Image (cartoon, coloured by chain):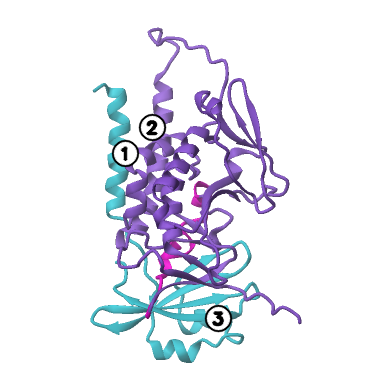
Chain colours: A purple, B cyan
Amino acid sequence: MRCRSRLRLCSFFLACAATVTTVAAQAQNTPSDTSVATVKVTTTRDPVDKSYRKMIKGMERFEREHAYAPAASLRFQLLPRTPDVNMAGITLRLAGDTLSVKVPVEPDNSFVLPRNEQLLREDAAVLANRKTTSMTWRATIVTPGLPPGTRRLGDMRLECRVGVEAGLVSNSSPLFGWLSNALTSADEVCTSPNGNYLFFAERPLFAVRLRAGARSETLPFHFLYAGGGLPRAELPFCDCQVLLDRTYYVPLWDKAWPDDTLVEFEYMNNLPEAQP
Amino acid sequence: MSARSVFPALALLAALAGCATSPVPPGTQVPAERLAASVVPGTTTRAELLTTLGATKTVVFDSGYEAWLYQSPAGNGRFTEFVILLNPQGLVAKTRQGPTSTPAP
């Protein structure tokens, strides 16, 4: 547990180091480097746009490991990442070289990704009509019929596996993303105390508790608010920038908590009682 | 390995070495009885917390809410968390106690 916060902080140092090395490498590519071949690029793809192939791989992982959440189905969801993004009226499309397919987006900004072999062959991108860094993406796997204000740990274990496999976690720097992939796979992220896969509650959180039968535990403070130690200047590098008060981790790796464990939320504010 | 490829590797190693020694600041330690006597939801203010308990680990949100973390000794080197939620008006909105664990260094 102790190294969780260190590693989170560490990831920012790594991002900075990666950025510095990129600049350094670019500085060395002077005009006198005549040995470097010229490549003509006819199209560009924003590196933060989601890969259709990767998201389909995430869906395939969901099917393979459905036992974590046997009664749940898979959706994806768009969440705000920068303060100025308008989350109303988002449209989504799958863009291949010769084919473009619109994906219906629900009012809660969730969607189901259709499978299309031609788009897979064309290595399509999943594009939203927003700046790519303004949003983050997550898998949403929710067992129906859970009590209000709760989630199920097995659902979240599967969300993590699908989310990482699908490449949903946003990163500000392409090199940061490369580094993350080099150091972590879906299995490592979702089975290690240092995996640091962020979840977002529906409302600002005050406490998160785990309950399995007679056993109940409140999660430590550093499981909330992205560890509670991020300087404000570093928030733009985190998916949690505008959802900080809704951000939490759960011990996905701890097999002492079964998949049926309920994750209970205490919010900062109680909802007003419904009028009869 | 060329000099161009060695430099990024060295930079990353340096960054990792720095991470290995980065301390994590814990919350200020205050006896549980003093916390219970000093913090009253709906009454205690931010200024009173600073005066009676001192500054501690704090997370400030865009909404104006703040979460403050204190720790009280629980014996055998363990500490119990005491978390305070301050509303945008600077009043204690709610508190919670626990869990008890060995604190980060």
Secondary structure beneath dot 3 equals: strand
Question: In the image, are marks 2 and 3 on the same chain?
Answer: no
User: Hey, what amino acid is under mark 2?
Assistant: Thr
| Callout 2 touching callout 1 (CB < 8 Å) | yes
The magenta span reads A214-238
Q: Which mark is residue A21?
A: 2
For label 2, the SS is helix
- Hey, what amino acid is under mark 1? Leu
The answer to whether residue B26 is magenta is: no
Marks 1 and 3: same chain?
yes
Packing grade of label 2 (10 A; few <14, some 14-19, many >=20) is many
Query: What residue did someone put label 3 on?
Result: B94
Chain letter for the residue marked with disc 1 in the picture: B
Determine the chain carrying the residue at label 2. Answer: A
Q: Which residue is mark 1?
A: B12
| Residue for point 42% across, 89% down | B34
Indicate which disc, 1 or 3, sits on the residue closer to the N terminus: 1
Does residue A23 appear to the left or right of A91 in the view shown? left
Q: Nearer the viewer, residue B10 or A61?
A: A61
Measured in 3D between alpha carbons, the distance from the residue under mark 1 to the one under mark 3, in whole angstroms, is 43 Å
Residue pushed farthest top? A34
Residue B59 position, x and y percent, is: 51, 66
Q: Name the residue: 67% across, 42% down.
A: A104
- Mark 2 to mark 3: distance in Å? 46 Å
Give the residue at x 28% y 55%.
B21
Q: Tell us which disc is closer to us: 1 or 3.
A: 3
Q: Name the side, left or right, on which B41 lies relative to B99.
A: right
